[in-house]
């Protein structure tokens, strides 16, 4: 299957608490910046370098579905609502998918 540019994205965001994850998810869906946000229910273990030290933390992962056109506003909303100095906000292109689902994403963020 050839890759295509669907104009849709999966955006990954980590949060330090379940409450913060829910708040951010509700904020971006209410604002029509994401069609859907999945919150991984169990904490994930993150190991990362921060300020020259290797750190370990329990975090909650958000998986957001949006469009390329809405990404900048989504990113800005996450940055405003997030407690981290440098939150993870990574956008991955959706190169293929169910046409009905891809259209639903677009319709949900219009």
Image (spheres, rainbow, N blue to C red):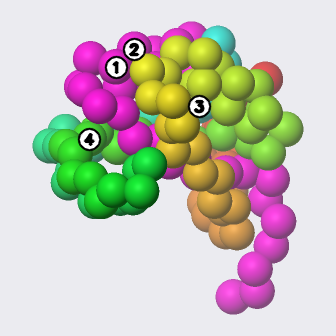
Q: Disc 3, disc 4: CB below 8 Å?
A: no
User: How would you rate the neighbour count of disc 1 (Cα within 10 Å): few for under 14, some for 14-19, many for 20 or more?
Assistant: some
User: Which of the two discs, 3 and 4, sits closer to the camera?
Assistant: 4
Circles 1 and 2: CB atoms closer than 8 Å: yes
* Element assignment for label 3: loop
Q: Which residue is under mark 1?
A: 20
Q: Residue at x 26, y 17 (%)?
A: 19
N-term mark: 4 or 1: 1
Q: Position of residue 12 (x, y in %)?
A: 50, 48
Q: Is residue 49 left or right of residue 10?
A: left
**Residue depth check, mark 2 versus mark 4: number of the one nearer the observer:** 4
Q: Which residue is mark 2?
A: 23
Name the quarter where the N terminus is drawn: bottom right
Gap in Å between the C-alphas at discs 3 and 2? 15 Å
Span highlighted in magenta in the image: 1-30
Tell which circle, 3 or 1, labels the residue nearer the N-terminal end.
1
* SS for callout 1: helix
Q: Secondary structure at mark 2?
A: helix
Q: What is the secondary structure assignment of the residue under circle 4?
A: strand
Q: Which residue is mark 3?
A: 35
**Which one is earlier in the sequence, the residue at label 3 or at label 4?**
3
The CA distance from mark 3 to mark 4 is 22 Å
Give the Cα distance between marks 3 and 1: 19 Å
Looking at the image, is 7 positioned above or below residue 82?
below
Of 9 and 85, which appears nearest the observer?
85
Q: Which residue is mark 4?
A: 59
Q: CA distance from mark 2 to mark 4?
A: 14 Å
Q: Nearer the viewer, residue 106 or 48?
A: 48
Task: Give the residue drawn at x 54%, y 37%.
Answer: 86
């Amino acid at each position: 299957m050839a890759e295509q540019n669907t104009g849709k994205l999966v955006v990954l965001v980590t949060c330090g608490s379940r409450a913060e994850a829910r708040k951010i998810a509700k904020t971006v869906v209410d604002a029509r910046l994401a069609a859907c946000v999945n919150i991984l229910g169990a904490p994930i273990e993150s190991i990362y370098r921060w300020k020259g030290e290797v750190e370990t933390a329990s975090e909650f992962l958000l998986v957001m579905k949006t469009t390329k056109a809405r990404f900048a506003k989504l990113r800005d909303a996450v940055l405003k609502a997030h407690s981290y100095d440098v939150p993870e906000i990574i956008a991955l292109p959706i190169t293929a998918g169910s046409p009905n689902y891809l259209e639903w994403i677009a319709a949900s963020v219009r």
